[in-house]
Amino acid sequence: MPLYDYQCAACNHQLEALQKISAAPLTDCPACQAPELKKQLSVPGFRLGGSGWYETDFKTGTKKNLAGDNKPD
């Protein structure tokens, strides 16, 4: 489930909410109870890795081309 950032237009309270993508956006501020919460645009804080991803993703140095390492010189 993604994390969404919200900010209240009435009191400027900020919060993060863990919600399903299909869930309706939050509207009521937990600090001042005003129905003024607005969803903020934010950068995701995750990295895709592990089996199933391209072997060159997030690799550095000599480990970048593992499939090509078995070539004869």
Image (tube, helix red, strand yellow):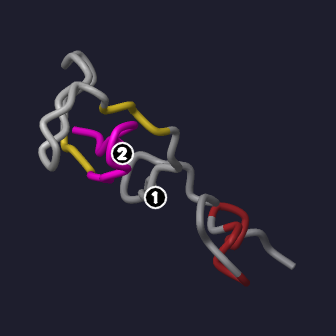
The nearer-to-camera label among 2 and 1 is: 2
Which quadrant holds residue 56? bottom right
Please tell me which residue is depicted at 63% across the width and 68% down the height of the picture.
Answer: 66
Circle 2 Cα neighbour tier, 10 Å, few/some/many (<14 / 14–19 / ≥20): some
Amino acid at pointer 2: Asp
Specify the segment rendered in magenta: 1-15
Indicate whether residue 10 is drawn in magenta.
yes
Asked if residue 71 lies left or right of residue 22, the reply is right
Q: Position of residue 41 (x, y in %)?
A: 52, 39
Circle 1 Cα neighbour tier, 10 Å, few/some/many (<14 / 14–19 / ≥20): few
Classify the position of the C terminus by image quarter. Answer: bottom right
Q: What element carries label 2?
A: strand
Q: Is residue 40 above or below residue 70?
A: above
Q: In this view, does 52 lie above or below 20?
A: below
Q: Are marks 2 and 1 in contact (CB under 8 Å)?
A: no
Q: Position of residue 34 (x, y in %)?
A: 20, 31
Q: What element carries label 1?
A: loop
Please tell me which residue is depicted at 16% across the width and 44% down the height of the picture.
Answer: 32
- Return the residue at label 2: 5
- Return the residue at label 1: 47
Q: Position of residue 47 (x, y in %)?
A: 46, 58
Classify the position of the N terminus by image quarter. Answer: top left
Which quadrant holds residue 58? bottom right
